[in-house]
Amino acid sequence: MTNVAILGATGYAALELIKLLLRHPHARITMLTSRQEGQPHVSEVHPALAGMLDLRCEQFDAERVTKTADCVFSTLPHTASMEACAQLLDRGAKVIDFSADYRLSDPNVYAEWYGESHTDVAHLREAVYGLPEIYAEEIRSARLIANPGCYPTAAILGLAPLVAGGLIELDGIVVDAKSGISGAGRTPKLAYHFPECNESTVAYSVGKHRHTPEIDQILGEIAGTPTQVIFTPHLVPMDRGIFTTIYAWAKRQHSEAELLDLYRSYFVGSPFVRVMSRIPTTKDSAGTNFFDVTLRQVRGAVVVLCCLDNLIKGAAGAAVQNFNLMYGHAETTALL
Amino acid sequence: MTNVAILGATGYAALELIKLLLRHPHARITMLTSRQEGQPHVSEVHPALAGMLDLRCEQFDAERVTKTADCVFSTLPHTASMEACAQLLDRGAKVIDFSADYRLSDPNVYAEWYGESHTDVAHLREAVYGLPEIYAEEIRSARLIANPGCYPTAAILGLAPLVAGGLIELDGIVVDAKSGISGAGRTPKLAYHFPECNESTVAYSVGKHRHTPEIDQILGEIAGTPTQVIFTPHLVPMDRGIFTTIYAWAKRQHSEAELLDLYRSYFVGSPFVRVMSRIPTTKDSAGTNFFDVTLRQVRGAVVVLCCLDNLIKGAAGAAVQNFNLMYGHAETTALL
Amino acid sequence: MTNVAILGATGYAALELIKLLLRHPHARITMLTSRQEGQPHVSEVHPALAGMLDLRCEQFDAERVTKTADCVFSTLPHTASMEACAQLLDRGAKVIDFSADYRLSDPNVYAEWYGESHTDVAHLREAVYGLPEIYAEEIRSARLIANPGCYPTAAILGLAPLVAGGLIELDGIVVDAKSGISGAGRTPKLAYHFPECNESTVAYSVGKHRHTPEIDQILGEIAGTPTQVIFTPHLVPMDRGIFTTIYAWAKRQHSEAELLDLYRSYFVGSPFVRVMSRIPTTKDSAGTNFFDVTLRQVRGAVVVLCCLDNLIKGAAGAAVQNFNLMYGHAETTALL
Amino acid sequence: MTNVAILGATGYAALELIKLLLRHPHARITMLTSRQEGQPHVSEVHPALAGMLDLRCEQFDAERVTKTADCVFSTLPHTASMEACAQLLDRGAKVIDFSADYRLSDPNVYAEWYGESHTDVAHLREAVYGLPEIYAEEIRSARLIANPGCYPTAAILGLAPLVAGGLIELDGIVVDAKSGISGAGRTPKLAYHFPECNESTVAYSVGKHRHTPEIDQILGEIAGTPTQVIFTPHLVPMDRGIFTTIYAWAKRQHSEAELLDLYRSYFVGSPFVRVMSRIPTTKDSAGTNFFDVTLRQVRGAVVVLCCLDNLIKGAAGAAVQNFNLMYGHAETTALL
C-alpha cells in the first residue's frame, strides 16, 4: 500500500484522480492540499465525493506532505507546481506532476511559451514524459513524471506510428482538436459560462496554445528531427472528451488496412489503445482510460481520427497508469 | 418613431430587447448604458450584434438619457434600478423596469424579501404590473411599468383562469418550475460554469425565491383574497425556456375539455397565449413571445403545464408588448 | 464466482450492467442475448465495450441460458420478460428482472396499467421488490427479484421515512420528476431525436405513467393503507439522472433538522443513501449507485429533493446490489 | 406580393423557411406539401407554428402547385426534388431547390457522388448556384436556383477571397467542419438519438461526404482551374451552427491585417458577411443569416475560422436571400 497526496485537490483532474485512487487496491489517499482557506472538507469542494473520502484540504506544507505520503500527485498550475515539487523531490518523494513544468526539456522553450523562467532546471533534467505507450521503460524507474497534456496525448499517440515509420512528411501536419469544456478548468469565466458556451463551438488560442511545443518535442524525439505541427484547439459544448482530427501528407501509398495494421503493431502491449476500423466517438471513451483511433486516406492525406477522455487518459488516468508502472503494479490496475 | 434607451445593456435580457427593437418599425435605440468602463461598443459586449447596431455603452446620466430618449427600458438590478428610474420619471420619461423594484405594491414585502428598504415609494404607487394579458388597460395609460419576472409570468398566466373562476382551492397550490440557465444572468459563477451545470438538474432557493411574493400578490388580486403558493424553481441544462408544472386542488369536477374552454375564453384577445390540448415543450416557444399552456386532471388535482421563453415572454418580449400598448401600436408589433 | 447471463443486452441498462459486472470480483458474464439477427458482437452493439468483453449476443434459448449461467439479469421489455423468466425459473435459475412484470403484486393492477394479462402469476407470488433499503431481508433469500423502476426508486426512498413515521398526509402527495433522456430507452423516436429534445423540457404521460401503481403499492405497504400519488414525469436535456421534487403535507410541525435526523436514522445501514443538508444535483450522483436526498419545509409542505442515476441506482446498480445480497457478498461490491 | 409554395414542409429547413417567410412583407405562403398521409395541419407537423400559419400539408401535385404559387421552394430530398422541379419549371414556376439536384453542373459528377443518374439535365443547364456573395447577378435573372449546401457555403465563402486572389496553393486545402445535429435532418436514427450523440463529438463520411464535389466545383470556378479539397465533417452536440476551420498553404507572406483587408474588400456589398478580427462562435450567428469569418497565420498555413447557422445562411436564409434578389427586393428583406 502506497500513501499518496494530491496537491491542488479542488480541480476537475483531482476529482477524477481521487475517484480512481479510491478504487486502487494499492494506494491510500492520506493528504489533500488546496489554497482555499479554512480547510474545507473534500465533500464541500467536490459534493460528488460525499461519503466516499473523509479528508480535509490542507494548506501545502512540504514537510507535512512528505511525512504523510510517499508519492505525490500535483495538480497545481504551472510555476506553482514546480515550486512545490522541487521541495518534495528534495525530501525524497516521488512526484507525478500534471502541470507543464517538467514537460519541456528545454527551459528556453518553456520561457518562450509560458512567459516565465523555469525555476527548477535541476529536477527538469531527470523528469520523464509520462506517456506509457512510448516511455514505459523510463517511467518504471522515474521519480519525477511529467504527466502529459490532454491535447498532446491525443496528437502524439495519433501520429506516433506514422512518424516512427517515416510514412508521412513532417511538414504541414495539421492537428485539429475538439475538446469538452472541462478541459478549460474549474474557474468560472464568461467564456465557460453555460449560456455563453452551450450550443456553441469555437476555436481558441489558434497557433498559440501552450500544448504546441509539447507536441513538437515528443514528435521530434520520435522522428529524430525537429518537427512542428499546426495545432488548433476548439471547444465544443460537452463536459468531457477530445476528438482530434489529424491531417498528414503521405510519403508513399499504403492501403488503409496496411496502416491500421501498422497502428496495431505499434500499440501491441498498450492495453489502453484501441485501434479500430470504425470512427470512434468521444462518448465511447468518456469516463475511461482508453485512447481510440482509426484513420482514413483522402486525396493524398492520411486523416487520423482519435478520441480520449481529457480528464482520464488526458490527465488522471494517465497519472494512475504512470503510478502503476512506477510501483510495479499491473498497468491497468484501477483503470478498467 | 419613439427614441428609446436601454439601461444595463450588457445582460441577456438587454440583448434580446435590442434584437426585438431593431425590428420595431416605431422604435429607435438611441442610447445604451452600462457600468463597464471605457464605453465599450455594443458589439464588444454582445458579439452577436456586430454590424447590427452602432452604439457605445455609456455611463448612466439621467439628464443625458432623458434628452436622448422618450422611453427607457431599465434592465438594471434591483435597488440600482429604482435609483435610476426615479430620476428618469422625475424628468418626464416613460419607464419600463425589468427589475423587481416596482412589482410589489407593499414596500414592507419588498423589504422582507429583498433585504433592503424601498427608496422610491412615491413612484411605486403609480407603477403598473406589466402583464398585458391581465392589465392591458392600465398599461395603456401607464408611464411606469413593472415588467414581470419570468417565473411569475408563467405561474400567474397558468393559474389565472382557475383562480378567476373560483375553481380551485387557494391553499396548497404547488408551482414547480424548470428554467434554462440564462435565467441566472450573465455573471460567471461556479454554479453556472458549464462543466458544473451541464448534464445536471437541481432545485434552488426552495421556499425562498424572490419571485414568490410577486406570484402571491397578483394571484391574490385576481382571487380577491390573500394567496400563497409553494414555489420551487429548478435549473435544467438548456439556454432558454421555462417549463412550469402547477398542481392545484379542484373545488369541483370539470372535464378537461371544459377547463380548456375556460382557458380559451379567458385568453380571448391575448395574441400571445396558445391554449392547446397537447403538452407544450419549451422548445416550441423558445425565441418567441408565446405562452403555451394546457392542463390535465389527475386524482383530484388540476395539473397545469405551461411554457415560455424566459428572456422573451419572461422579459424582453413582454417589455416590447408593454411598449406597444403604451404607445398605441398593435400589441404584436415586432413580436411575430 | 457466479456465472451470469444478461437478456436483452442491447439497451442502456444492459450496457451499464455489463460495465459494473466486469468489475465484479465474484461474477462472470457468460452469455448475452438479444433479438438482433446475426449474433452481433457486443462491441458492435455497444462500441464503448470494445476490448472489454468478448461475447456475441445470441438468440434467447432458456435451456442454453440455464446451462451457462446461474443468475440471469433480464432487461427485456415487459411481457417479453415474464415469458423468458418463467422458463428460467422453472429450470432453477435465479432471476433479476428489470421489467415491470413482477413488480405489481396484483395481476389486475398490472392488466389495468399495462393493457395485457399477466401470464406468470405463479412466479409473481414469490417475487421480491428489489429495493434493498427497504426489503434487504427478503432479497437475501429471494430467487426472483423485481428490480424497481427508476422513478419509483426515487419517489419511494424520498418518501419512505415520512410515510413510515406517519408524519405526512397520504392524500395529495405530488411527485414531480425530471429525468435525463436515457430513461426513454435506446429506440430512436422523433421525441428523442437530438434536435427535438435538446434545449427542451417537457412533461409526458401526465397522470398515466406506468410507474405510478408501483409507487402507490410500495408506499401503501409502508403506510399500511392504500396510497395514491400524483406523479408527473418530465424529460430534461441531459443523458443521465433523475431529480425528483416531492410535495407532501405535514401532519404536524417538525424542524428541518428533526426531519433530516429522521432520514438519517431510517437509512442507517443503507450504504448508498446520502442524506444531506444541501440540495443535491443529479450530476453528483451520476455514474454512481447513490441516492442523494434532502428536504425543506415551505408553507406547510414538506418538500423532498432527491436524485439518482436512472441507469445505475435506478436500474443496473440496484440489480448488482440485489445480486450482492442474494449471493452473500458485501452490498457495495463493484458499486463503489 | 408573391405567392410561394414549399415542398417537403416537414423538415427543419422548411420550418425555418416558413418562419422567415411569415415575416416577409412581399411573400405569402399559399401551399405546403408533404408525403405524410392525411393532410396534417402544419402545426401538427411543427408545433412551434401553432397560431402562426393556418395551412394543411397536401400531397404534391404540380398543377395545383403552379396554380397556387409563382415561386416554389423545394426542400425535397435529392432525386425526388428534380422530379418535382422539372414539372414546375415546365409549367412556368420559378424554383429555389434546397437539394443537391441542380448544384453540380456535370451530371457525371452527380452520378458518381449520388449514385443515381441525373434525370433533368435540361433544366440543370440553366440552374444558378445560389450563393449571392458570388453569383448575385446570375441569381437576379434566374428562374432555377440551386440553393447551396450548408458545408459548401462556409467552405466556399471562407476560401473565396484567398482563391480569387491567388494567395494560396490549390493543393492540400483542408476543410474541417463541425456541425450541429439539425444538419442531419429530422428522421430519427440511432446516431442522432439524444443519448447517443449528446456529450459526444464524431467525424463522419470522411472523404466521402457529398458536399465535397460542390466545394470543389465552385472553388474551381473561382480559381479557373480544377480544385480539390480534403473535407471532413463532424457532428458536435448542439442544435444549430457550423464552425469551419480551413487550413490552406500561403504562396507568399502577408500580414493578418492585409488578409483581413482582402476579405473586407472581397465582401464589400455582401450585407451578411461579417469579417472580424476576433474568432467567431457559432452562437453569435445562430438564428441569423450572417456568415462570420476571421483568419490567422500559423507556421506557413492560413487558418480561416468561420461560422454560420446551417439552417439559415446554410439553407432557408440563403433561399430567402435568393428570393429577394430574384424578385427585386432589398437583399436583407425579412433577414435582419
Image (cartoon, coloured by chain):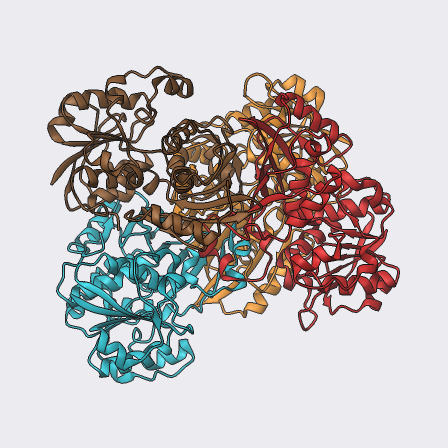
Chain colours: A cyan, B red, C brown, D orange
Q: Quadrant of residue B42?
A: bottom right
Q: Is residue C280 visible?
A: no
Q: Tell me residue A162's x, y (percent).
A: 25, 58
Residue D47: which quarter of the image? top right
Q: Is residue D36 above or below residue B108?
A: above
Nearer to us in this view, C100 or C297: C297
Tell me what residue is drawn at x 53 percent, y 32 percent. D101
Please name whichever residue, A126 or D250, is drawn nearer the observer in this view of the structure: A126
| Left or right: B122, with B262 as reference point | right
Residue at position x 39%, y 47% from top?
D202
**Can residue B2 be seen?**
yes
How many numbered badges does the structure rendering display? 0
Q: In the drawing, does residue D308 fall left or right of residue C1?
A: right
| Coordinates of residue D19 in the picture (x, y in percent) | 66, 36
Which residue is farthest front?
C252
Residue at left offset 19%, top offset 66%: A135
Q: Closest to the observer: D179 or A309?
A: A309
Q: State the image coordinates of residue A275 (x, y, percent, origin top left).
A: 24, 49
Quarter location, residue D23 = top right
Where A76 falls versus D240 (above or below)? below
Left or right of residue C94: residue B115 = right
Residue D152 point in image, percent of width and height: 52, 45
B282 over B106 or under it: above or below: above
Q: Quadrant of the N terminus of chain D?
A: top right
